Image (cartoon, rainbow, N blue to C red):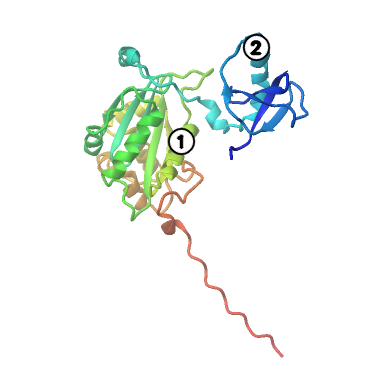
């Protein structure tokens, strides 16, 4: 049995109703079981969608207007998802333009492979570079140029898991750092919250024993990180350690993973930067707090 769907009645066509769904499909269904008028919502069992017949051309203007009304039938998007729309895939003919584009933002990923992605305004990868030996080895197995940043993140996570950078016997940290170098107030290139949301969803979908952390850096932080030859994520980690009075050589920070650095600290360096779902992947048992033993009740005095 086909599932019922919701749509808007466009017109009556004799003994039939023409219904437009939120996906933009037209359906022709018997009218005898439905007491509705054009412009009203209806729940029905679809038979088959229609191609654009002659009558549709005459009602195209009305149908376009109804599409705006049908927005109320669609599930509400997450506010973060509304901030940046999914960019279209790069067409083969656009590769030359992509190679000549100037980055408007950089997204680094630290697992321990550290990788930097240069992004266009539409979120496509102009170039990718490994910021340490692990990152260079991982990138040798990937082809990220031209992909969207979400697609690139997919490949990085898959390769990191296959290369045993995310072992299942510990809770790993995957740290992303966004640096926007050319800001557009009317249309943000990308926002940290969006990156954190996407990363957390991918970790959960892939059942990875890891937690998503999203940071944001100023262009000046990236410039200094480039001078020190470290990822901007590790540079920000070093700055936080320094602010707490910890003297750790930045070369040592670059050599170690952020997870290892955090493990040596009594306090959480990324308390406000983690996703809201700490128990992600197949390592939940390590993150659950043990239950306190129940206290024995004292017998009542007679």
Q: For residue 255, what is the image quadrant?
A: top left
Secondary element at image label 1: helix
Residue closest to the far front: 15
Q: For residue 254, what is the image quadrant?
A: top left
User: Which residue: 29% across, 36% down?
Assistant: 114
The location of residue 137, given as percent across then percent down, is: 21, 36
Q: Work out whether residue 256 or residue 172 is closer to the camera in this orientation and state it.
A: 172
Quarter of the image that includes the C terminus: bottom right
Residue wearing tag 1: 198
Secondary element at image label 2: helix
User: Which residue: 66% across, 11% down?
Assistant: 61
Quarter of the image that includes the N terminus: top right
Residue closest to the far bottom: 302
Mark 2 or mark 1: which is in front?
Answer: 2
Tell me which numbered mark, 2 or 1, is placed earlier along the sequence: 2
Q: Tell me, yes or no, whether the two marked residues, 2 and 1, touch with CB atoms within 8 Å.
A: no
Q: Work out whether residue 271 or residue 164 is closer to the camera in this orientation and state it.
A: 164
CA gap, disc 2 and disc 1: 43 Å
Q: Work out whether residue 289 or residue 53 is closer to the camera in this orientation and state it.
A: 53
Q: For residue 143, what is the image quadrant?
A: top left
Residue wearing tag 2: 55
């Amino acid at each position: 049995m086909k599932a019922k769907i919701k749509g808007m009645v466009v017109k009556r066509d004799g003994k039939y109703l023409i219904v437009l769904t939120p996906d933009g499909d037209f359906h022709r269904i018997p009218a005898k079981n439905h007491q509705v008028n054009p412009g009203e919502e209806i729940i029905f069992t679809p038979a088959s969608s229609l191609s654009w017949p002659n009558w549709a051309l005459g009602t195209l203007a009305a149908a376009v207007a109804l599409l705006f009304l049908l927005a109320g039938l669609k599930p509400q998007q997450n506010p973060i998802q509304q901030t940046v729309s999914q960019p279209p895939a790069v067409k083969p003919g656009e590769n030359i333009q992509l190679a000549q584009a100037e980055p408007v933002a950089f997204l680094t990923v630290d697992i321990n492979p550290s990788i930097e992605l240069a992004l266009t305004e539409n979120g496509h990868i102009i170039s990718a570079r490994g910021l340490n030996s692990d990152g260079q080895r991982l990138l040798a197995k990937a082809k990220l140029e031209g992909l969207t940043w979400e697609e690139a993140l997919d490949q990085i996570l898959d390769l990191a898991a296959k290369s045993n950078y995310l072992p299942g016997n510990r809770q790993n940290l995957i740290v992303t750092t966004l640096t926007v170098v050319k800001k557009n107030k009317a249309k943000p290139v990308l926002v940290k919250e969006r990156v954190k949301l996407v990363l957390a969803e991918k970790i959960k979908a892939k059942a990875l024993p890891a937690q998503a952390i999203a940071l944001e850096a100023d262009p000046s932080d990236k410039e200094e990180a480039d001078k020190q030859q470290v990822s901007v994520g590790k540079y920000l980690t070093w700055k936080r350690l320094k602010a707490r009075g910890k003297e750790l050589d930045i070369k040592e920070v670059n050599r170690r993973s952020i997870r290892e650095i955090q493990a040596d600290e009594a306090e959480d360096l990324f308390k406000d930067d983690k996703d809201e779902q700490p128990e992600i992947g197949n390592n939940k048992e390590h993150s659950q707090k043990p239950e306190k033993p129940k206290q024995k009740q004292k017998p009542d005095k007679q």
